[in-house]
Amino acid sequence: MTAPSASPGAGHRTARVEAAEWARLLAALAEGGDALLDAPTALTGWTVEDLARHVHWGMTLEADGLRLLRGAGEPPGAEVAAGTPAEGPRAGLVAALAAARDALVAALEVTRDAPEDAVVPMPYGPVPLGLARQVFTMEAAMHTYDLVAAARDARGAVTGAGERAAMLGAGDHGHRGSVVLPACATVLAAFWPALAAAGTPPAPGTTLALEGPTVRLGARYDGASWTPHEGPADAVLRGDDAVLLLVAYGRVALEGSGVDVVGDAGLAARLKAMVPGP
């Protein structure tokens, strides 16, 4: 449960993957048209329109943080940091998202050679650039998944856990598969204690783990917070990396996901009550 180490070319890979993920989101949104905007998403209480406006807000914040990292002073979109989502008519949403995506990808490219320990100022606190890149990639991949899944659900398409995993990059041996899944795992590990602060804590000493072919996350609740844990756990969730991550991020229900539980099944079932979000 640590921030990623420096990796040559990480900034360029992040820019390429984010450009591709956001392009997928924009394509699905444009194809669905206004009818899709009222469709529900897997995010409780959010429609596709709510998700699209949140995405615009998030991309703007990320681009602003990278511009501040470069010492560019007060960025043009700094007012978005107050939490106001993108406003304006529905007809302008796709164009606004495309412009925000272009600004973010440009900022990622400009900062691609910056050291990974450089600090990116974000509303939730200063974040090392190496971890910020992982957060931005996770946001792009997970919210693109949210919108593509909502569009399929709106069409009445029946999708099992395996197909939903493919929407997140499972089975893709190119940039998506090699960057998206590790980013989602890294962010979950890094922010596990913060996410759990809003949850219902288990008994002190409780241990929980997620184990996939490459995903390995373990945590122990010490009575005050969650800390990294290695070794046997009270409950271990085992399965495909992408499906495990979708379960952990609350996009797919544990029951029927194909994820196996070793140990305390009741504890595993309370995962999202203990660690809600993101």
Image (spheres, rainbow, N blue to C red):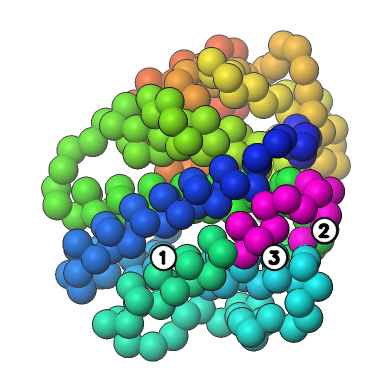
Looking at the rendered structure, the kind of residue marked 3 is: Leu
Residue hosting label 2: 119
Residue 51 - label: 1
Q: What residue is shown at x 74% (from left), y 83% (from top)?
A: 74
Q: Nearer the viewer, residue 13 or 18?
A: 13
Residue 209 position in % (x across, y down): 65, 23
Specify start and end residues of the magenta stretch as a single range.
107-120
Which secondary structure lies at badge 2? strand
* Residue identifier under label 3: 66
Q: Residue at x 55, y 52 (%)?
A: 15
**Amino acid type, residue under disc 2 in the picture:** Val
Placement of the N terminus among the 4 image quadrants: top right
* Image coordinates for residue 108, horizontal then vertical, percent: 62, 58
> Does the magenta segment cover residue 110?
yes
Point out residue 90 in the picture as x, y percentages from the top left corner: 30, 81
Q: For the point 33% across and 73% down, which residue is it? A: 94
